[in-house]
Image: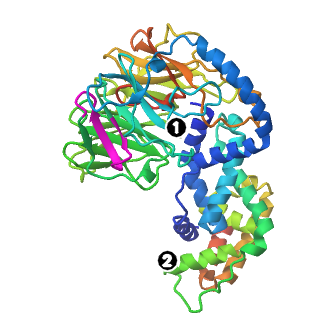
Amino acid sequence: MTWLRDVLVDLADDSPQVDLAERTIAAHHRRRRTVVSLLAAGMVVVVALGATAAVRLLPDRRQEAASTGDLPARGVGPLSHAYKTFCEPARGEAPKGCRDGGWRVVTRSGETYHVPDALRSLAPGRTGLRDSPLAISRDGRKIAYYSADEGTFQVRDLASGRKTTAAQKVPKSLLGSVSRLMLSDDGRFVAFSKVPDFKDPALLIDMRGGAVRELPNRWVPIGLSPDGATITLAEYSPRSRLRTISNLWPSSSKGDTTSVILPVDYHFSPLAPDGRTVAVIENLSTAERPCRRGDLALMDTLTGEKRKPTVISGLPADVSQISLRTWLSAEEVTALTMSVRCRPASDVPDDEPAVIDQPYRTMTAYAVNVRTGKARKLATYRAQGFFEIVLPGPPGAL
Amino acid sequence: MDRNDSFREFVAAHQQALMRTAYLLTGDAHQAEDLLQSALLKVFGRWFRLSRVEYPEAYARKVLLNQYISWRRRRVRAELPTADPPDRLYSSEDSTIVRLVMRRALMRLPPRQRAVIVLRYYEDRTERETAELLNCSVGTVKSQAHYALARLRELAPELAPKLSDLEAEEARR
C-alpha cells in the first residue's frame, strides 16, 4: 500500500497550482447571464428605480458626502476606515466615481480619497481578479498596501506623505483570493498572509531594516508585539486554531511556536492590548439555522482556555453577523455588525443566481465591553462585505 | 460572510486536494483544471445548501468523480495515450522512471478502474467509502481494484512483483 501511495503522491505533486474560486464564480455568472439576459434587462430598470429610492432614504451617507479625489501627497488626517469598491453591485448603486477593485480611505473628519498607488483588485475590463489588501495602523495615521508600481508592499505616513517600500518584491500572482495585511502600530512591520496556501510562504516584513521573515500561509495575523518579535496568528478554516510564534528575528531561526487547536469554530478578534488574549464568538450556524452565534468570551491564545462567556447586550435584535475588530481599550473591543436576512438552506433555490458584486450594505460598529457585554454604538459605514472594509488595527478572523 | 466569500474560503481550503485527485484521474494539468472547474461550477450552483452542511467537500469530491467518469466515457477514444512503454529494462527503485511508467499505465486504465485506484491507494479510502463515492457496490469496488491491479501488472511488467505484493497484502486485510 505504502509503495503505490508514494508513487501516486509523487505523481500528484505535479498537479497544477491554480486558484479556481474567482474563475468559477465568474463562469457561473457568465453562464447565468447568457440564459437570463433578456429578463435581466427588464429587471435592471426595476432594481435601479428601487435602489435610487432606497439610497435616498439611507440615514448615514457621510463617507460619500465629500467629492472623492486621489490621496494628497501629504497632510492627510487620521483615518476612520477604508473600503474597497466594486462598481456593479447586484442591487443599489456604487459610490460616485467608483473605481473597480480600488481602495478608498475615509478620514475621521469625513474626507474620502482614492488610493491610486494601491493595486486594484480588478484590471480594466473587470478581468484579473485578485485580492489587494490594505491595512491601517491602530492610530489611523499610516496605511500599508500593495503598490502597483513597486510590485511589493509599501507603508505610507499620511501626514508627511513619506513612503517606505519593502526591500523584497512580491509577485502579484502571490496575492491570492483572500489576503490579509497587518501593519504594526509604529508602521515598521507589515505581515501578509493569504489563501489559497500554495508553496509560497506568508511574510513578515521589517520595512525599516529590510529583513523578511517567512510565516506559515493561511493563518491570519491578528497581533504583533511592539518589538516585532512575537506574532499571533489565527486560522478559522477549516477549523479554528491559534498559533503564537516568538523569537522571530533573526529570520533564519525557526522561532518558538505554540499552537492551540480548538474544538469548535470561532470568530476571533485581533490580539488584545495585554498581548495574550483574544475575544471570541462561537459560530453556531447550521444549514437550517444560519447566522447563529454564541456569546462573547475571552480566550488565552497560548492555552486556548476560554473564560466565562458574556451575553452581548445593546445590539439591535436583527443583527445577524458580527466581525470583531480593533480593541479600543483593555476593556472594549469593536464589533462590526450587519443586519442581513439569513435564510435556511431549504429556502434557497438551487438555481439562485450567484452575486458577483455584493450590494453596498450598512454596517454599524459598536464598542463592546468584554466584562459586561454591554455595547455602545460608534459609527455607521457602507461597504460590500466584511472583507471589503478595514478599520484601524490588526484584522480579526471571521 | 456571504455566499461568494464562503465559497472562496471553501475553494481555498480544498481545491489543492481536489486538484491532486483530478490530476491523478486525468493525467494532464489542463484537463485536471477543466475537470475541477466543471465540478466546482456544479458545487457553486448549490452552494447555498452545501455551505451549511457539515462536509461540503465530500459532495464536491463526488461531483468531481462523476464528472470525470462521464467525461471519460465520452472522450476515452481521444485520450488513450499513444506513447510506447519504455524500451529498456528499468529498476523499480528508480523513482523518476517508476513515476513515468505508472502515469502511463494509469492513463490506460478504464475510468472507473482508475478512479478506484486513486481512491483506494492514493486517498486511502475504505472499500465502502470508495463505493459510496462512485455510486456502486462494495463488490464492484473489489472487482474493479483487482482488474485494475492486474492490468497495471500487464502494462508495467517491471512493477508486477510490487503490484502483486500489494494485492496479496490487500487480500489479508
Query: x, y (%) of residue A174?
Result: 43, 51
Question: Seen in the image, is B92 located left or right of residue A164?
Answer: right
Give above or below for A247 relative to A275. Answer: below
Task: Please tell me how crowded label 1 is: few (under 14), some (14-19), or many (20+) other residues with Cα within 10 Å.
Answer: some
What is the three-letter code of the residue carrying label 1?
Answer: Asp
Position of A5 relative to A203 (above/below):
below
Give how far across and how far down residue A240 sits, in percent. 48, 35
Of residues A19 and A171, the one drawn nearer to the viewer in this rendering: A171
Host chain of mark 2: B
Query: Which residue is label 1 attached to?
Result: A100
Observer-nearest residue: A175 or A296?
A175
Could you tell me how many numbered marks the image carries?
A: 2
As drawn, the label of residue A389 is none
Does B131 sit left or right of A210 as displayed? right
Position of the N terminus of chain A, as image quadrant, is bottom right
Instruction: Using the image as rendered, state which of residue B166 and residue B148 is in the foreground.
Output: B148
Q: CA distance from mark 2 to mark 1?
A: 49 Å
Could you say whether the residue bearing mark 1 is in a helix, strand or loop?
loop
- Mark 2 secondary-structure assignment: helix
Residue at position x 62%, y 37% from top?
A: A356
Q: Amino acid at mark 2?
A: Ser
Residue at image point 53% right, 26% down: A95
Give x and y (percent) for residue B117. Answer: 67, 66
Please provide the residue range marked out in magenta: A144-161
For label 2, the residue is: B95
Please check the rendered image and state whether residue A156 is part of the magenta-colored stretch, yes or no: yes
Specify the quadrant of the image occupied by residue A234. top left
Q: Are marks 2 and 1 in contact (CB under 8 Å)?
A: no
